[in-house]
Amino acid sequence: MKAYDSLKVTPLLPEALQPLQTLAMNLRWSWRDEAHALFRGIDPALWSATGHNPVTMIKSLRAEKVRELEQDKDFLHRLQLELEDFESYCEQDRWFKKQTSGGEDAKTTVAYFSMEFGVHQSLPIYSGGLGVLAGDHMKSASDLGVPIIGVGLLYTYGYFTQTLSREGWQQEHYTEHYPEDLAVTPVLDEQGEHLHVSVLYPEQREVKVAVWKADIGRVPLLLLDTNIDANPDDFRVITDRLYGGDAEHRIKQELVLGVAGLRAVQRFCEITGRDEPDVIHMNEGHAGFAGIERMGQLIVAGETFETALAVVRASTLFTTHTPVPAGIDRFDMLLAQRYLQADEQGNSRLAPGVPVARALELGKEDDPTRFNMAHLGLRLAQYANGVAKLHGAVSRSMFKDLYPNFEESEVPITSITNGVHIRTWVRGPMKSITSAMSGNRDLTTANHWNAPDAIGSSELWRVRNELRKELVTRSRMLSLESWENRGAQEAELGWTKNILDENALTIGFARRVSTYKRLTLMLQNPERLRRILTNPERPVQFVIAGKAHPADMGGKQLLQELVRYADEAGVRDRIIFIPDYNISMAKFLVAGSDVWLNNPIRPQEASGTSGMKAVMNGCLTLSISDGWWDEFRDDEAGWTIPSAVHADASLRDKWESQALYDILENEVVPMFYDRDEQGVPQAWVEKIRYSMSVVAPQVAAERMVRDYVTELYLPAGRSSRYANNLEHAREFAQWQGKVKDAWGNVEITGIQNVTGEAQAGGHAQLEATVELGSLSPEDVKVEAVVGRTDEYGEFIKPRKVEMQPDVETGKFVMDIPVSVPGTLGYTVRVIPDHKLLRSPAELGLVRFPN
Ligand SMILES: *Cc1c(COP(=O)(O)O)cnc(C)c1O
């Protein structure tokens, strides 16, 4: 029988239960265990069926359940406490206010653009580490009271969910998500209508973009959605999937993120009476078009291209996340040109005012057929950073051609090492003992993370056992489910009840399946691995998860190789692949594993964050020295797999895997199984304690966000406000033109060592005669460069000291302290100098003596 039609039945939440709705609509509940427990407690089965989504759970409550809750005094009391906690969380003064109190910096506000945000499983708009990082950034910004607005896309399908075929081949599934089932609300305009902004595509076609808002504690996250009635079908699908489709689909999405995103933030601020953000933070190059749009607005208002660029650069921060050139987002130049849409005058219809030819130049690279979004980001941003120290260095080398005539060390890309949000990632049992010991109930202040020292060994070990047990239980369930999906019959599956051993050394490995992360490094010597796994006295087990990008055939093959090995080598109860890696799974995986394995090809892992989550839970690190571990690696906190620098990739993999087996057999396994009379592995627990107290505070997102604020946001806010006084930007733009024109006549005609031979502990006086042509001494900096040199006369890490003009002689002079005896090389250079210039390398202008 077929239904004639359908009608909707919505639950009526009585007054007393309204706070449930309030709590459900702000994702802050997701990092507050008490709120989580409150929701779950209403109906654990329903909670699990809705995928831990309070919004849909509340909508599915039966009338009897609602009446029951309404009468439940204890429940209402807890609800009230949660509401009060939430309200006080939102109102309390926070770190940012204290940090900037009374000063000019207090005005700084930031718009943070990202293609993905991983806040919670119930808001499926992320795929992996980049998104989770953006989510943790929002959460910590909320905790710290940083005035920031997130901007992203609301995908209809999000990223895919993963299952395996019988043969172990990845299967992708897409589920439609409706905004009314998510913790998002429409942003309303002044008339109370759902706010729409628009962006123009070729052939004068206007795409309408609806603006939604998710609340992450105190931080609003604006989400853009083209799947609305006002759009024709081909526009409705623009925001369909994360990282799906071809290059044209991708550029369409990036135009929505950048152009519509900037317009959305501006309208949102107008409507809510906020100041427009003065800093634009582009999390990866995907949002580069935001800078083009902002330039267009300034040009339409009468400014020159140069002035507009100066304003945008002074207010933009670009964060790069990939040390691999192949990982960079690049479009065909013709595609970019088509979407920028030149009118008869050559000006963009997409971003009115911007000359298309010049916009294209901002994204140019070596290959003239490519428009490079990272180059665009760097050219639009005076502030740029990588995400770990090593990654900063690799980025400076990778992008040095954008800053000709300067040394790699002077490339203006700094680094802020990633971090993870403690409250989100520390699992319940560990959270209880650490917060009880530190007296820091909220665990929001990493500085007070001194708990592990105070926790007794047996207590710490008890919690570790509890977390491992949870991992084993959940893995069994998910494994059974996976085998059913793979078409196995229930009768064949009795063995899955006994997979994994809750007392065995458990190694976790879960991350996107990208080639460089080397999921299958452990399979280099399958026989040796089998022996490690099946050792009767000291067994080892692996729990593995990760999705391959749907278009990445190589990645899917690696995955299949791993699954087949587990099936065929008779170790399918010791090496478990759990499909559909996501945030919920990551939480119990990083917490329940004893060791977190990370074996990327150095230096291709920009930072990596799953290992940080592991550390916070007392899981120890076993890693190649790359990304974050290159910086924090410490033999007392974990184990480092030596990386082999070898041109032959297969030899490198062979050596590194051997080192991995050696460390496992000789160090990790013995230490784990070496127990005292109480069954506690004392040395192991000591290592956990060290790792948790020394490493964990440094990899907290709170530390990361503070660093962003003090090292980048506040300086960018200052230069942004300075340049937004357009007199300053115009003057700077004109000055740049003047300096470029005059640079040909700048010359260093003489350098004198006035001192002759200097004595250690004394000074050497240098004097330089500089011809500045039409420039004045204020336009330049004259620097003495001093240091040891190699056999070719090249400086090794030289010092640079600014020289002062001598009013009488017109020469530039400097007394340089010298302390170490030996031979010192010196030279002098002239570089441009201006208040709005952040790095000497920006203009590519420098003069050395002939
Ligand atoms: C943390 C996390 C990642 C990132 O892991 P890496 O170690 O940086 O590769 C990816 N996916 C999910 C679901 C995560 O929680």
Image (cartoon, rainbow, N blue to C red):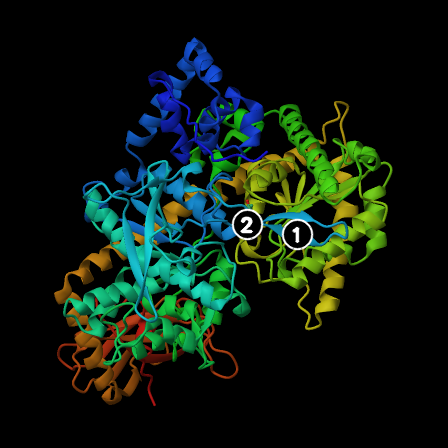
Q: Position of residue 133 (x, y in %)?
A: 47, 48
Which residue is disc 1 drawn over? Answer: 171
Q: Specify whether 492 is left or right of 616.
A: right
Residue 226: quadrant of the picture: bottom left
Q: Specify whether 313 is left or right of 684.
A: left
Q: Nearer the viewer, mark 1 or mark 2?
A: 1
Q: Quadrant of the N terminus?
A: top right
Mark 2 nearby-residue class (10 Å; few <14, some 14–19, many ≥20): some
Q: Is residue 252 above or below residue 563?
A: below
Q: Position of residue 644 (x, y in %)?
A: 68, 64
The kind of residue on which mark 1 rests is Gln
Instruction: Check disc 2 and report its element: helix, strand or loop.
Output: helix
Q: Quadrant of the C terminus?
A: bottom left
Residue 636: quadrant of the picture: top right
Nearest the eye: 812 or 93: 93
Nearest the eye: 686 or 225: 225
Which residue is disc 2 drawn over? Answer: 632
Q: Position of residue 313 (x, y in %)?
A: 28, 65
Q: CA distance from mark 1 to mark 2?
A: 37 Å
Q: Specify whether 541 is left or right of 316.
A: right
Residue 454 in view (yes/no) = no
The kind of residue on which mark 2 rests is Phe
Residue at (72% x, 50% y) in the render: 165
- Checking the image for residue 15, the label placed there is none
Nearest the eye: 98 or 175: 175
Q: Position of residue 333 (x, y in %)?
A: 42, 77
Residue at (26% x, 63% y) in the render: 294
Mark 1 nearby-residue class (10 Å; few <14, some 14–19, many ≥20): some
